[in-house]
């Protein structure tokens, strides 16, 4: 980049401020402008290059690993990369990642929306400020701390709930429990729910706060109860915002590594029961297998990383599309 | 904006700089083991060892290395040894990529790894130096049961989910005196690939192939049980979970009860340092040249020999070690193989190498270049 | 409604007295405790669940009888919202509480100013000084890389961005926000191997920078959009070139928001463990040089203390204390960000 132009550029204040229509359009031709635009555009292009590099590199390494895979990469229930005939597949990981995230979403989204409503419409004003602040902070608590808490506090406290679920719902098979430490997919899902709760709450709260006052007042004037106001004015307005908030949370749950790695008892089987230990997620598997993996094993893990990457990309794309629609609809800051 | 941002930045940088000046490394001076350190320090030859040494590998020998490093750095000021117990695989990979000075590994180098090591070791290759013996204890957590005896078939059935309760007749038969509770057996295995798993399953395959039909290797392949990461992880779970049982290096089993193995010898053998050394004496060297890889006889019935024993190696280049780290590596390995070094092992629940083997190790270490 | 007929003087329907929610709550807690004790249910969590269920049901039944269906629905929504809030508070509170309670045990000046040095993983002693230095340096370098690039990209998107390139950048910034941190770590690791470099704090910083950039772009973008167009137009109308307009008019107006965004991004990456785990190697000794040699970092330290210690209490205490330090660090950044946001908030904003 030609940096000398910055210093050599003439003092950029033309004496006679002649206002010619269309002048602004030509402003980009000034040397200073060109350099600045170059810098800004360069940064944007750099970001694109980084993304492209990540994608290309993941694909390249993954392809090398998958071509040597003796099993089926999509359906094999095994991860053994050390032998002379490496066999590995992502079926278990994909299942575990999806299941734990879905559990997390099922728990976190309704509660987060309720808390957001609580903060914007129910809580006494004096209470809502500090609570909102604390939840903001919790969104920034590092995931390893959640992991530590999950492994040392949450797991021992899950036994009661697990026993109860097994007693009353064990016959479904989904909630069958054999006893033993509660290091299962359900615990992971609950921990992930606790983790993403603050994020979803934050964004939803912002959305609910932007509901036009007039809509609510109009509903109140018609004699609606508070719940009816929320159902008729607040929720419809905030729906797409809540969805995109949930997608944000989902993105985080899908890629969460350390919290899952500390809590789950992993294995390479798909279990019908959510309460019995086992299963695994992409990120957890990478983190826990990485240490012992040789070069080929790492490539195999990178291949699974690629799948995670694609899944996250799809989820984010969906969130993006929803946000884009909302923008057209509300017209704010477009 | 710029000035303020600059000021903020300057503040942050100067703050960080100020911080970098005020900390210090914990040299363990106030901790325990003080007396031992000063007693031994005189016997360690530093021989120009300086600077920082990176090493990675087996978590099984991490505790042993911790103990050695404590003594070694007390004697040789200015040396920092950073051994990360990232796992044998990680260690060997890092070694063949040239990012660490030596690696710790639970299994000897494979032929292709030796080939890869030739790129790092100019004019030489990577060799295995057996340095630490680790009895793999089977630890359990059953209240009121102290001296549990198990044999290979029972172990195999417990770890493959075929014996599910502590009051199972098979266990009762081996422990007629014990008051075995009606408690679910919760077996734990390693979730990561591990030399410990490899050795444990090798033992089961060697002694009771009828009851253990699963593949050996570093990854756990049998059904049932829960898993946890690292020796430390399984140890933690056994400690926390009533009814739990798992295998781990003896040094990790400090706080739990340990199973005595019925090997067919006169008395059941409890995991112990002496038992492991006795078993290793039964092993034969299978490495060629300077490589001292060992093959343990798992089916040993020798009196007092503890059969589930793991030999962990230090992996270095025989020739062509990096010039800047060679003095430190050599001096550290010399200390490890010395009488003092091996003695410390026993204090930390590791098994010293038998004399015959360690003498060969000393010779090889002396010839490293 | 029948109630209105019975009280012709009043426009309001019958209402439950103001204290009724409290009474119902008290009642349901009492019943659940009784049930819990009687049925021998050990878990307090279950007691809580039963109590909340009873509360919701009780409110609905009472309200439906006294106030009518619509009011009852309103009440049930209110009580559900409260219950949800309380349910969520329990784990979050437990998280904060246990960190503080267990963290303060070994947290003292010695702990903050010493490294682990030769202290074994399962022995007491040692400190986190080396990890603090590592985290500060890695996060600092990541910020130095990511903040300028992020801000410039945001400027490009808001001030210049029309057309396919801008759309592509916007899209991929969003995609980048979702990159799992471990994938970013893997990427940098393979770069290291290709370039034949060793582990260092700098490598960790690069991965953190990848994670940080999209967050900075997003928040800066939002802030720049809030700058009123009138300001830009006025400046341009005076003949000021566009780049000077951006530097002297647009950025100063938005600087508060931008700084907040950057600080929140810093807070976010300060807690990243996975990429650091792969890239900086970890080091029990102090290493002040991020460009050479292995370093430690706070999240990595917490993980190692948890994972390598065979359940030793001393190591757990250290892990909690380090967690507390990390949370405090993140919290201070958050507070600072909010302070700056308030102090510098554009007066013309909403």
Image: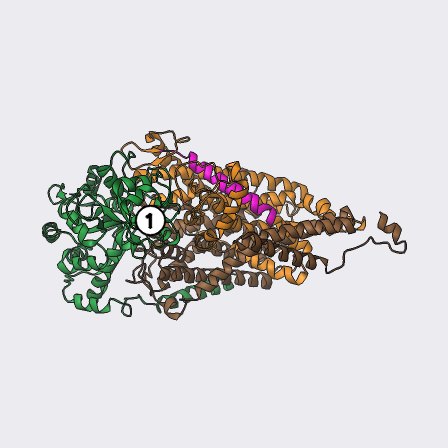
Q: Mark 1 points at which residue?
A: B230
Which quarter of the figure has residue A306?
top left
User: How many labels sit on residues?
Assistant: 1
By secondary structure, the bulk of the magenta-drawn segment is best described as: helix
Q: Colour of chain C?
A: brown
Residue C24: x percent and y percent?
Answer: 69, 56
Please state if B301 lies on the left or on the right of A231 as rendered.
left
Q: In this view, does C201 lie above or below A290?
A: below
Residue A31: x percent and y percent?
Answer: 50, 49
Pointer 1 chain: B
Q: Colour of chain B?
A: green
Check disc 1 and report its element: helix, strand or loop. Answer: helix
Residue A19: x percent and y percent?
Answer: 65, 50
Please state if C76 lies on the left or on the right of A324 as rendered.
right
| Magenta region, residue range | A88-111
- The local crowd at label 1, few if under 14, some if 14 to 19, many if 20 or more residues have their Cα within 10 Å, is many
Comparing B74 with A79, the one in front is A79
Q: Chain A is drawn in which colour?
A: orange
- Residue lying furthest right in this view? C8
Q: In this view, does A325 lie above or below C348?
A: above
Residue A323 visible somewhere in the drawing = yes
């Amino acid at each position: 980049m030609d940096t000398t132009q910055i210093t050599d550029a003439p003092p950029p204040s033309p004496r006679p401020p002649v206002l010619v229509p269309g002048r602004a359009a030509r402003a980009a031709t000034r040397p200073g402008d060109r350099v600045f635009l170059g810098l800004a555009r360069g940064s944007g292009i750099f970001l694109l290059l980084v993304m492209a590099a990540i994608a290309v590199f993941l694909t390249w390494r993954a392809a090398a690993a998958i071509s040597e895979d003796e099993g089926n990469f999509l359906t094999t229930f095994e991860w053994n990369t050390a032998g002379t005939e490496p066999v590995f597949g992502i079926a278990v990981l994909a299942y575990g990642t999806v299941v734990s995230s879905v559990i997390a979403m099922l728990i976190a989204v309704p509660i987060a929306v309720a808390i957001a409503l609580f903060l914007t419409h129910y809580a006494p004003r004096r209470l809502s400020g500090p609570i909102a602040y604390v939840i903001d902070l919790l969104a920034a608590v590092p995931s390893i701390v959640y992991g530590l808490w999950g492994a040392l506090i949450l797991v021992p406290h899950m036994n009661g709930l697990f026993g109860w679920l097994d007693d009353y719902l064990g016959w479904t098979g989904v909630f069958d429990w054999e006893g033993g430490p509660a290091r299962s997919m359900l615990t992971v899902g609950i921990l992930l729910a606790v983790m993403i709760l603050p994020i979803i709450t934050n964004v939803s709260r912002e959305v609910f706060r932007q509901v036009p006052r007039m809509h609510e007042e109009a509903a109140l004037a018609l004699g609606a109860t508070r719940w009816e106001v929320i159902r008729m004015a607040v929720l419809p307005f905030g729906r797409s915002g809540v969805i995109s908030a949930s997608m944000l949370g989902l993105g985080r749950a899908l890629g969460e590594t350390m919290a899952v790695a500390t809590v789950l008892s992993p294995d390479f089987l798909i279990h019908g029961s959510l309460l019995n230990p086992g299963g695994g997620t992409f990120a957890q598997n990478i983190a826990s297998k990485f240490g012992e993996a040789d070069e080929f094993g790492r490539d195999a893990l990178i291949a699974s990383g690629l799948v995670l990457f694609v899944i996250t990309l799809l989820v984010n794309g969906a969130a993006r599309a929803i946000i884009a629609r909302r923008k057209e609809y509300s017209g704010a800051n477009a | 904006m710029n000035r303020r941002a600059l000021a903020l930045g300057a503040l942050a940088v100067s703050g960080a700089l100020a911080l970098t000046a005020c900390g210090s490394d914990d040299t363990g001076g106030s901790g325990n083991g003080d007396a031992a350190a000063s007693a031994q320090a005189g016997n360690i030859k530093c021989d120009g060892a300086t600077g920082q040494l990176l090493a990675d590998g087996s978590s099984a020998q991490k505790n042993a290395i911790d103990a050695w490093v404590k003594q070694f750095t007390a004697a040789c000021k200015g040396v920092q040894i950073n051994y990360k117990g990232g796992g044998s695989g990680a260690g060997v990979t890092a070694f063949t990529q040239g990012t660490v000075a030596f690696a710790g590994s639970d299994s000897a180098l494979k032929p292709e790894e030796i080939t890869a090591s030739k790129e790092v070791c100019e004019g030489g290759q990577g060799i295995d130096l057996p340095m630490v013996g680790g009895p793999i204890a089977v630890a359990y957590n059953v209240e009121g049961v102290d001296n549990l005896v198990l044999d290979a078939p029972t172990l195999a059935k417990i770890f493959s989910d075929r014996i599910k309760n502590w009051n199972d007749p098979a266990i009762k038969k081996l422990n007629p005196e014990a008051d075995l509770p009606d408690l679910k057996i919760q077996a734990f295995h390693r979730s990561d690939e591990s030399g410990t798993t490899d050795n444990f399953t090798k033992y089961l395959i060697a002694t009771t192939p009828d009851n253990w039909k699963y593949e050996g290797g570093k990854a756990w392949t049998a059904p049932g049980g829960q898993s946890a990461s690292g020796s430390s992880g399984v140890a933690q779970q056994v400690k926390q979970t009533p009814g739990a049982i798992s295998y781990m290096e003896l040094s990790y089993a400090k706080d739990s009860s340990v199973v005595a193995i019925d090997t067919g010898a006169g008395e059941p053998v409890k995991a112990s340092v002496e038992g492991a050394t006795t078993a290793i004496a039964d092993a034969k060297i299978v490495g060629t040249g300077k490589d001292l890889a060992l093959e343990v006889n798992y089916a040993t019935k020798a009196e007092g020999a503890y059969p589930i024993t793991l030999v962990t190696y230090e992996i270095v280049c025989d020739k062509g070690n990096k010039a800047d780290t060679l003095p430190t590596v050599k001096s550290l390995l010399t200390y490890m193989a010395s009488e003092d070094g091996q003695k410390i092992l026993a204090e930390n629940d590791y098994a010293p190498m038998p004399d015959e083997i360690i003498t060969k190790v000393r010779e090889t270490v002396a010839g490293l270049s | 409604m029948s109630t209105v007929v019975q009280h012709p003087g009043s426009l309001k329907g019958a209402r439950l007295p103001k204290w009724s929610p409290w009474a119902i709550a008290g009642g349901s807690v009492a019943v659940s405790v009784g049930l819990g004790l009687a049925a021998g249910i050990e878990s307090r969590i279950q007691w809580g669940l039963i109590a909340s269920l009873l509360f919701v049901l009780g409110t609905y039944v009472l309200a439906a009888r006294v106030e009518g269906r619509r009011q009852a629905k309103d009440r049930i929504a209110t009580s559900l919202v409260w219950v949800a809030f309380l349910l969520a508070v329990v784990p979050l509170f437990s998280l904060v509480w246990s960190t503080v309670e267990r963290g303060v045990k070994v947290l003292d000046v010695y702990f903050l100013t010493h490294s682990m040095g030769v202290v074994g993983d399962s022995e007491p002693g040692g400190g986190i000084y080396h990890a603090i230095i590592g985290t500060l340096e890695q996060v600092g370098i990541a910020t130095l890389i990511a903040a300028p690039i992020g801000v410039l990209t945001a400027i490009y998107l808001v001030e210049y961005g029309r057309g396919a390139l801008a759309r592509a950048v916007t899209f991929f910034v969003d995609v980048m926000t979702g990159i799992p941190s471990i994938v970013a770590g893997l990427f940098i690791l393979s770069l290291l191997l290709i370039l034949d470099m060793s582990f260092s704090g700098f490598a960790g910083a690069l991965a953190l920078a990848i994670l940080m950039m999209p967050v900075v772009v997003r928040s800066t973008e939002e802030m720049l959009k809030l700058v009123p167009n009138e300001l830009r137009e006025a400046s341009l109308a005076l003949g000021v070139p566009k780049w000077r307009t951006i530097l002297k008019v647009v950025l100063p107006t938005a600087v508060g928001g931008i700084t907040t965004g950057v600080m929140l991004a810093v807070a976010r990456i300060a807690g990243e463990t996975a990429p650091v785990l792969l890239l900086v190697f970890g080091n029990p000794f102090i290493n002040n040089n991020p460009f050479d040699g292995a370093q430690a970092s706070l999240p990595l330290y917490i993980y190692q203390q948890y994972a390598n210690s065979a359940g030793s209490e001393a190591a757990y205490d250290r892990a909690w204390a380090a967690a507390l330090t990390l949370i405090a660090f993140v919290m201070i950044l958050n507070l600072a960000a909010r302070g700056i946001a308030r102090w510098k908030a554009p007066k013309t904003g909403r």
